[in-house]
Amino acid sequence: MDYFLFLCRVKTNKKMNKFTKAIAAIMLMMVFAVGCNKKPVEPQKQIPVGAVDGLFSVSENKQVYFSHGNLQYQPSTNTWQFANDQYDFLDRNEYVEINENYSDWIDAFAWGTSGINHGAVCYQPWSNSENDVDYYVYGDSIANLYDHTGQADWGYNPIQNGGNQVGLWRTLTKDEWEYVFDKRDTPSGARFAYAVVNGVLGTVLFPDDWDASVYTFDQVNVKRVFSASITNVISETDWHALHYQCGLVFLPNYQRAGLYWSSSCNNTYDEYGMNCAYSLANAAGTIVVGVSDFRHQKEFVRLVRNAN
């Protein structure tokens, strides 16, 4: 039976059973797998545990894998993990007091709060001080997360569903975020696009080898799009096929503030600059790379792992 005809029939049959849904999902993933035309994985190549199977250039000679979800932390067990799905984020009550006994998960952090005592006054992931000086990593006002021991970077921690070893992951620098969005030279020409995935607004990142014929995206590489005019609406089933077979990354946007930390501080010698670090602003309708934001602000963290 023709796959596409079968899928169309399934979609129009609202009374389909679980078995039929499963067959449809499998066939859809087969279609994407053929379309993505991925090269056979060489025996020595292994996709890191917890990573999306797509390579992204962050400089002329360096590529990384993105983690398969935003970083999460459970204070009561001192456990780090990646979100189960790329579109997952936690809707936490901002007025709930968080300390080392908090048993729920959190996924927004002040800058440099890796939980390792690297020299900042505030280094715990639940830190709530609004004094930016408290977040000087390594006790140095102009240090980056990757300076000194590197322990201020959240990726220094073992991630339980990301290999569970020290030092496997890291946070992108400001320059690397800029390269991903603005400077990558890809065969398709596509680097990113706004989308709604499983009902969640955010930004899709296309891997270096993305084949644009697999799935049609509108408004590619456009940084300003009114939320109401976003036409890239992707179902959960389609997204899982694109994620697993084609290596797409999705950065969810929480309400109007989809901010993601970089590992770079603002080292300008003025009171405002030294109190800030750089972020990716993935806000509703606008993408700004290299936003200078106060260190005490709570923002998302999306880790990467070096491929070479």
Image (tube, helix red, strand yellow):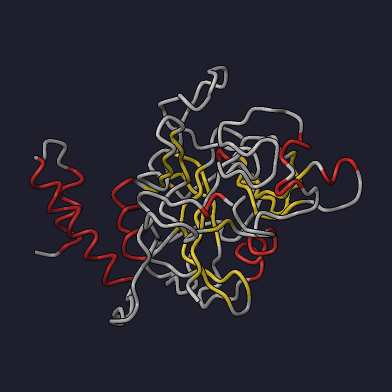
Q: Position of residue 146 (x, y in %)?
A: 65, 59
Q: Measured along the vertical axis of the image, is residue 305 above or below residue 127? A: below
Q: Measured along the vertical axis of the image, is residue 167 above or below residue 63? A: above
Q: Assign the N terminus to one quadrant of the image.
A: bottom left
Residue 182 falls in which quadrant of the image? bottom right
Q: Position of residue 287 (x, y in %)?
A: 65, 50
Q: Position of residue 62 (x, y in %)?
A: 57, 75
Give the camera-side residue of 144 and 198. Answer: 144
From the viewer's perspective, tell me whether residue 16 is left or right of residue 212: left
Q: Position of residue 100 (x, y in %)?
A: 50, 27
Q: Is residue 226 visible?
A: no
Q: Measured along the vertical axis of the image, is residue 110 above or below residue 238? A: above
Residue 112 falls in which quadrant of the image? top right
Give the camera-side residue of 96 and 142. Answer: 142
From the viewer's perspective, tell me whether residue 31 is left or right of residue 77: left
Which residue occupies 14% across, 56% down? 6
Give the camera-side residue of 172 and 182. Answer: 172
Which residue occupies 47% across, 67% down? 207
Which residue occupies 64% across, 47% down? 118
